[in-house]
Image (cartoon, grey):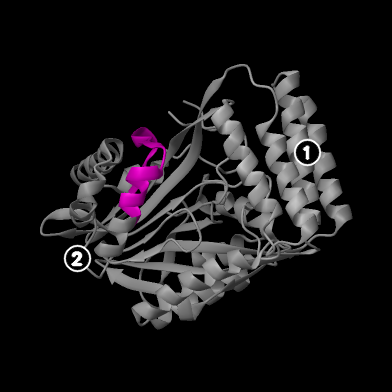
């Protein structure tokens, strides 16, 4: 349903056979039914009963955790999760999940799922839309938390997306998203113990601390919520996170050895990347992390939530990813991507829009210096114990901030 035809080496179309081979069909059917009911609830949008919805799909009152798509959207317990659901029902676009592409792995006393989908947004060029865009521009230009050059660059980037001529007055776009979670049975019914929603960014992650202190403030607020929960982190989870950060990032060599040490047996593990693509097996996961060979990851033990649910250990944590890029490196990256446009199957108008948006994004990044500090989130499912603890699922994402037409390639339907 929502397939991406451009696949990196080792990437799957989400129908990972490794998950299907081990999943009990009865339990798998129950989990697919739960996902279908979850989607139906999001379609119905009954925000007045968000509390009942949260209790129906998440474990008991203070034991569940959910991550929304944005920084600061960490919710602990069903009362807080209900506030996320109410907000989604009121303001989010229509969500659809691709059940045929769901990856499900069932254990004796727990399960994890990873399912792709899309969120529907409608854009238009009406007078009302232009008035809203003008207010946005005026608000950015008055934002004294941003450096003056960054304000101008952000306006330029936003207008590069908004003001290109389109064929239709009203356009529907399905933005890719991904949902993952760990589930356990409570009173005989599957419920989420933890869940993460993620959506891909554009040419660069949406939030960067060098843009504005507001992004750092949201990040700190999220971390304080995690700390205030007061959950002790199992020592084996701390060791796993330490190895994850040092073994897979800022590494220029072959990653198959650290991946083999960190992840479950070949074919029984998966990683969700920052573009909401699923990579399975050691080679596929290595192809994702190799892109971050010049980045440093710092995960915070102090702001980690972890708990055993059934025979799975799940982890939700945050941190920062740091990279240095000077203007020459940014320009070189843009030049390479612009040359690739000649190989793309798109008409001249779309190619020009893409080129304009890319150049505007590069100028925006260059306006904020050579150090790039991005907030990141990680939710994971691991099995085993002690030194034998291995990741089965790692959902690694950047926060999603800007809802803009053509910021990213739409999901295929």
Residue 188 is situated, as x and y percent measured from the top left of the image, at 11, 56
Secondary element at tag 2: loop
Task: Give the residue at mark 2.
Answer: 60
Residue depicted at 18% across the width and 53% down the height: 52
Residue depicted at 25% across the width and 59% down the height: 110
Farthest residue in the left direction? 187
Is 326 positioned to the left or the right of 112 in the image? right
Rounded to the nearest angstrom, the CA distance separating label 2 from label 1 is 48 Å
Residue 388's place in the image compared with 135, above or below, is below
Is 215 positioned to the left or the right of 111 in the image? right
Residue 31 is situated, as x and y percent measured from the top left of the image, at 24, 45
Residue 316 is situated, as x and y percent measured from the top left of the image, at 42, 67
**Disc 1: CA contacts within 10 A as few (<14), some (14-19) or many (>=20):** some
Which segment is the magenta one? 84-104
260 or 188: nearer the viewer: 188
Q: Is residue 282 magenta?
A: no
Residue depicted at 69% across the width and 30% down the height: 163
Task: Give the residue at mark 1.
Answer: 337
Q: How many marks?
A: 2
Of the two numbered discs 2 and 1 on the same chain, state the one appearing first in sequence.
2
216 or 265: nearer the viewer: 216
Label 2 vs label 1, nearer the camera: 2
Farthest residue in the right direction? 328
């Amino acid at each position: 349903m929502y397939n991406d035809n451009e696949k990196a080496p080792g990437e799957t179309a989400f129908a990972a056979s490794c998950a299907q081979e081990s999943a009990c069909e009865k339990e798998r059917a129950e989990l697919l039914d739960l996902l279908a009911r979850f989607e139906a609830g999001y379609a119905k949008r009954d925000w007045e009963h968000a509390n009942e919805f949260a209790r129906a799909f998440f474990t008991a009152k203070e034991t569940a955790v959910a991550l929304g798509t944005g920084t600061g959207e960490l919710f602990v317990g069903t009362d807080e999760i209900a506030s996320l659901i109410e907000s989604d029902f009121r303001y989010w676009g229509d969500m659809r999940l691709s059940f045929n592409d769901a990856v499900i792995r069932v254990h004796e006393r727990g399960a994890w799922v990873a399912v792709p989908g899309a969120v529907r947004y409608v854009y238009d060029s009406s007078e009302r839309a232009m008035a809203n865009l003008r207010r946005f521009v005026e608000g950015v230009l008055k934002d004294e938390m941003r450096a003056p050059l960054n304000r101008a660059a952000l306006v330029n980037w936003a207008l590069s997306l908004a003001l290109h001529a389109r064929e239709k007055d009203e356009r529907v776009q399905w933005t890719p998203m991904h949902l993952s979670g760990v589930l356990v049975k409570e009173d005989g019914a599957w419920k989420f113990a933890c869940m993460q929603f993620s959506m891909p960014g554009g040419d660069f992650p949406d939030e960067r601390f060098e843009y504005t202190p507001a992004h750092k403030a949201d990040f700190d607020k999220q971390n304080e919520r995690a700390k205030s929960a007061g959950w002790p982190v199992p020592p084996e989870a701390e060791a796993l996170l330490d190895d994850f950060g040092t073994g897979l990032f800022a590494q220029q060599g072959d990653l198959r050895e650290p991946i083999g040490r960190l992840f479950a047996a070949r074919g029984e593990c998966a990683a969700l990347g920052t573009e909401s693509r699923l990579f399975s097996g050691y080679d596929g996961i290595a192809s994702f992390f190799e892109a971050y060979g010049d980045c440093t990851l710092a995960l915070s033990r102090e702001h980690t939530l972890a708990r055993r649910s059934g025979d799975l250990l799940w982890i939700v944590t945050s941190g920062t990813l740091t990279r240095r890029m000077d203007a020459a490196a940014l320009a070189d990256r843009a030049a390479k991507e612009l040359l690739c446009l000649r190989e793309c199957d798109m008409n001249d108008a779309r190619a020009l829009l893409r080129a304009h948006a890319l150049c505007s994004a590069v100028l925006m990044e260059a306006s904020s210096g050579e150090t790039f500090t991005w907030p990141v989130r990680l939710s994971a499912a691991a099995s085993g114990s002690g030194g034998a603890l291995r990741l089965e699922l790692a959902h690694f994402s950047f926060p999603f901030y800007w809802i803009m037409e053509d910021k990213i390639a739409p999901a295929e339907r």
